[in-house]
Image: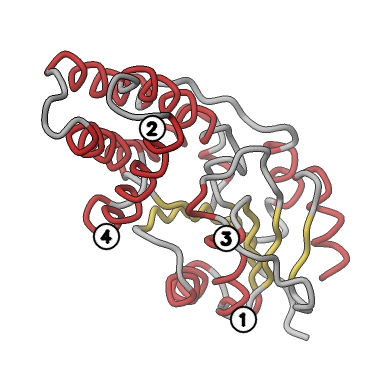
Amino acid sequence: MPRLTTIGFDADDTLWHNERFFQLTQSRFTDLLAAHAEADHLSERLLAAERRNIGQYGFGVKGFTLSMIETAIEVSAGRVPASVIAEIMAAGREMLAHPIELLPAARGAIEALAGRYRIVLVTKGDLLDQERKLAQSGLGDLFDAVEIVSDKRAGVYRTVFQRHGTGAEEALMVGNSLKSDVIPMLEAGGWGVHVPHDLTWALEAAEAPQDHPRFATLDGLGALPDLVAAID
């Protein structure tokens, strides 16, 4: 078995809270468009817009805000007031300024592994926003490398862990998303460790690969050092 040399961490909803701000903003969006669409229908239309726009806008707050504006125009047949568009834009700006709240054991897990392994942050989303969150988190100095990518696929993980480690086969990726953090890492030949978060974006849903020999699920990051020790 190849030895483990590199540990990759996802950021949003793995190290700090993130999805809660999207859901709070979506609730506000629902209230703003209440005269034009029922909540469930509006949610479906917004999710469809997000799915449709990922290829152009990417992941993150800016793409989400543009998708809300597009959805507001669609469900109102173009009659949405400019004041509502202004409130949607203001909500997006507020999301880009929200304070960072670390998840339990995030710092401790990284500190326990740093020094013995290369520690790499691998996150997707808007470059400026992810850089802001990392700076505010106070965790930046614990990482040997930071990769902010447009998407997470097997080829991306192969490239990242070859650049910053000894290849994906000797690396482990930990995150809250089965679709983005775990499954493509397993496809790349590495270890995929799922640490579920209470809130998960619908577009990140996927079935757990239960029978895969390099897949594991943890209740929290506090259990990660022991898992890594058992693997290595």
Q: Give how far apart the Cα atoms at labels 2 and 1 are.
A: 31 Å
Decide which of tag 2 and tag 1 comes sooner along the chain: 2
Judge the density around disc 4: few (<14), some (14-19), many (≥20) Cα neighbours within 10 Å: few
For the residues carrying marks 2 and 1, which lies nearer the camera in this image?
1
Q: Mark 3 points at which residue?
A: 181
Tell me where residue 210 appears, x and y as whole percent.
77, 71
Mark 2: which amino acid?
Arg
User: Is residue 108 at least partly visible in the picture?
Assistant: yes
SS of the residue under disc 4? helix
User: Is residue 118 at least partly visible in the picture?
Assistant: no
The residue positioned 32% from the left and 39% from the top of the image is 64
For the residues carrying marks 4 and 1, which lies nearer the camera in this image?
4
Q: Give how far apart the Cα atoms at labels 3 and 2 are.
A: 21 Å
Colouring style: secondary structure
Q: Mark 2 points at which residue?
A: 132
Q: Mark 4 points at which residue?
A: 55
Quadrant of the image occupied by residue 182: bottom right
Label drawn at residue 88: none
SS of the residue under disc 3? helix
Q: Quadrant of the N terminus?
A: bottom right
Mark 4: which amino acid?
Gly
Left or right placement of residue 132 versus residue 67 in this view: right
Mark 1: which amino acid?
Gly
